[in-house]
Amino acid sequence: MFRLQRNTQAPTISVELSEEEADAFGAELDALRAEIVADLGQSDVDHIRSIIRWCQYSEAGGRALLHFGIGPLSFVLGAGALTVSKILENMEIGHNIMHGQYDWTRDPELDSGTYDWDNACAAENWQHYHNFEHHKYTNILGKDRDIGYGLLRVSEEQEWNPSHLVQPISALILASLFQWGVAAHDLHVDEVRPNRKSVMALYERSRPFLKKARRQLAKDYLFFPALALANAPRVFAGNMIANFGRNLWTFAVIFCGHFPDGVRIYSEEECENESRGQWYARQINGSANIEGGRLFHIMTGHLSHQIEHHLFPQIPAARYPQIAERVQEICERYGQAYNTDSFGSQLGGVARKILRYALPGPARPQATAATA
Amino acid sequence: MPAPSTQAAASDLPTTRRAPKRTSFSEAAARAAQRLHLDRQLRFWVHELSPLSTPDRMLARVTGIHDETHDTKTFTLRAGRGWQGHTPGQFTNVDVEIDGVRQTRCYSVSSAPSSRHLSITVKRVSGGLVSNWLHDHLQVGDIIGISPADGDFVLPDDAATLLFIAAGSGITPMLSMARDLAARGAFEDTVMVYYARSADDLIAGDELSRIAAEHSGFRYVAIRDDAHDGTGGFDEARLRDMVPDLFDRAAFTCGPAGLMDRVEAMWRDAGVESRLQRERFTLPTLTDAGGDPNVERSVVLTSSGRTAEVTGGETILAGLERAGEKPAHGCRMGICKMCRCRKVSGSVRNVVTGEISDAPDQDIQICISAANSDLALAL
């Protein structure tokens, strides 16, 4: 499915497009988008419904094994099935529905306006910082708060401060609690000042988060354990492992989407008055793909096709593999680097950055290896 | 002119009938599930195990399909959870999935009232998406969505003498009324005049003749366009001859716009318009309502930031669709209100009522509104 290591080639640098080139580039991508949109139909709906069915059956199966099973094997299988279900729900189902990828079906179950995914992050918070801030201002330092999640330094452009020294450890903590990181992300905790007004404002904007967090915790750590009676500790532990597994997986996939080697960070000035074509180019240069098989892509919610997702966040994600080749071909003709590699390589690139940028310094990772 | 809608009832008044409020076990369970974010799971498993019990959605299973005429079929349905029967003359919103997209249309219920069963009678509309799909793809055993019955095209409680003037598939709401009156033996003095192209186009013609033979209080006259003696087609004088006391009766009409306009004119001229109940299946032509197809209006969609051009001679919905937009909508004729959206600025006219909306921040139904000026809509 994916190879662990592979020679990392020096990332190709994209050429700067002239205004005319950028317009032509944008027009080609617009045409590709229009072509796919016109082709949407029953098979797209059948796909997402079949994933929903898999997700529901694996949740029910996983919970049944945890609740009624005896012995370690049923525990491992139960926690595993529950993990798979949580991953499917968050990635291929929740993330993609909340992007509005299935709004055209007019099915209320697939409606971005009402869908709220099964994790600690409140839909309204996510709609704002992810759909708006992150997708519009992708990789613009100072605007896209997803760069390092306000916690990690993942590029030389970010200013160093002493808290970054421990970021190899904070990254591991963020990975294991990722849903809480995502959930708290829109609360702007870092902007809180030590005065009553600022703290009250934080409390006010935390309401959707607190409500959702309470219910999520109650479900996995009170309701289901209580339902299991004598098996309560087992169910409690199984739910915790499933949440933990889902967190690690989503962290890995998402960090591979924007922070591997060769992904570019932009300044606000660079992006002023940018045309549609230039916006497309930034999406491509600010994203990276992960190679893998069909099952792998589904388990990542097709965020393994981060480039296609950033170009067309509202096209049903299961279409991305189908258009990837054509996007790559267009990129080649316009001299745009198309960053794709195995899961192992991309993850390695992210890990190297987290280690390297824990220390101050603007130099490239390879060059500083000797001096650091 | 907009694409002719499939047959439907066109009452624009909100229904006054509401289900009595009561908290059942299933509602309490649904609330608890919602509090724990398990409502999706609940809906999925109920739908998986017993589709007709699905909460939040009213479904029906197709139990029979039969041909009424060469272009009209009746689908009998067994309604699921939530169906509370209908009053003869009312319609239901039917929703089906075509190419992955949910499509909604209104159809009059053609059967007599029942708490479990209903039927809809659907004529193929040339170029009509839903009616043709129902004819070509819907099978016995399939499940479709329905809505609680709605509409004010219903019999009055007190009127003893009735007159039904139906044409084509406009017979369907009156079929339900006639079947109900027959089942209850409640005909006192009812006349039904049914206009159709030919004998082959009569929907439920045999059944209506049989009801007339069995019930002395029911007179049934079928008038065919292809009659050789020159008595075919609608004619005001002949109608008056056939039913001399027509204006004294509680009258109901439903059919193509041309016929309904003439019937309406008769009752208006006689000064008794209030005694005529109407059910429109098709929108009046837009040019009659003062629209100009040569005038381009630009519509700014404030949510998406896009702009589209529509003309004064089409509904805003039709114009936006022509421009590649896919606004939410249902019946396409002003009934279901699924297309309702906030008009931020500009002037529109309701093509059914002629009413003008020119104040900012009003809700309009884009399926029955045409642009009188440039617009901004919260879409």
Image (cartoon, rainbow, N blue to C red):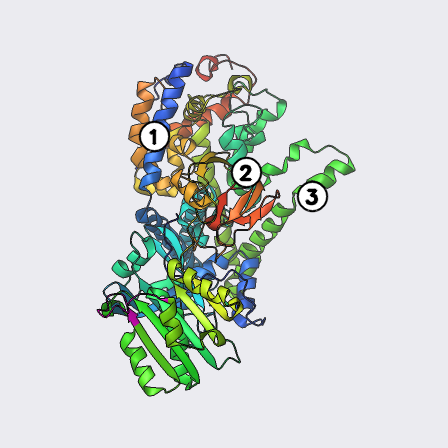
Check the residue under mark 1 and report the chain it is in.
Answer: A
Q: Which residue is at the front of the view, A154 or A263?
A: A263
| Residue B177 location (% of width, % of height) | 41, 76
Q: Amino acid at mark 1?
A: Ala
- Specify the label residue A31 is tagged with: 1
Up/down of B207 relative to A349, above or below: below
Please name the predominant secondary structure of the magenta segment in the image: loop
| x 70%, y 34%: residue | A192
Residue B228 highlighted magenta (yes or no): yes
Q: Which residue is at the front of the view, A30 or A344?
A: A30
Asked if the residue at tag 2 contacts the one at tag 3, i.e. Cβ–Cβ closer than 8 Å, the answer is no
Q: Is residue A303 left or right of residue B26?
A: left
* Mark 2 Cα-neighbour bin, 10 Å: few <14, some 14–19, many ≥20: many
Up/down of A317 relative to A260, above or below: below
| Residue A262 location (% of width, % of height) | 42, 21
| x 46%, y 32%: residue | A255
Asked if the residue at tag 1 contacts the one at tag 3, i.e. Cβ–Cβ closer than 8 Å, the answer is no
Residue B288 highlighted magenta (yes or no): no
Q: Magenta stretch: give its range.
A: B223-235
Residues flagged by tags 1 and 2 on a common chain:
no
Check the residue under mark 2 and report the chain it is in.
Answer: B
Check the residue under mark 3 and report the chain it is in.
Answer: A
Q: Amino acid at mark 3?
A: Glu
- Specify the label residue B376 is tagged with: 2
Would you name the residue on which mark 3 appears?
A: A204
Whole-angstrom CA distance, mark 1 to mark 2, is 27 Å
Whole-angstrom CA distance, mark 3 to mark 2, is 33 Å
- Name the mark nearer the viewer: 1 or 2: 2
| x 76%, y 37%: residue | A197
Question: Which quarter shows the N terminus of chain A?
Answer: top left
Which element type, helix, strand or loop, lies under badge 1? helix
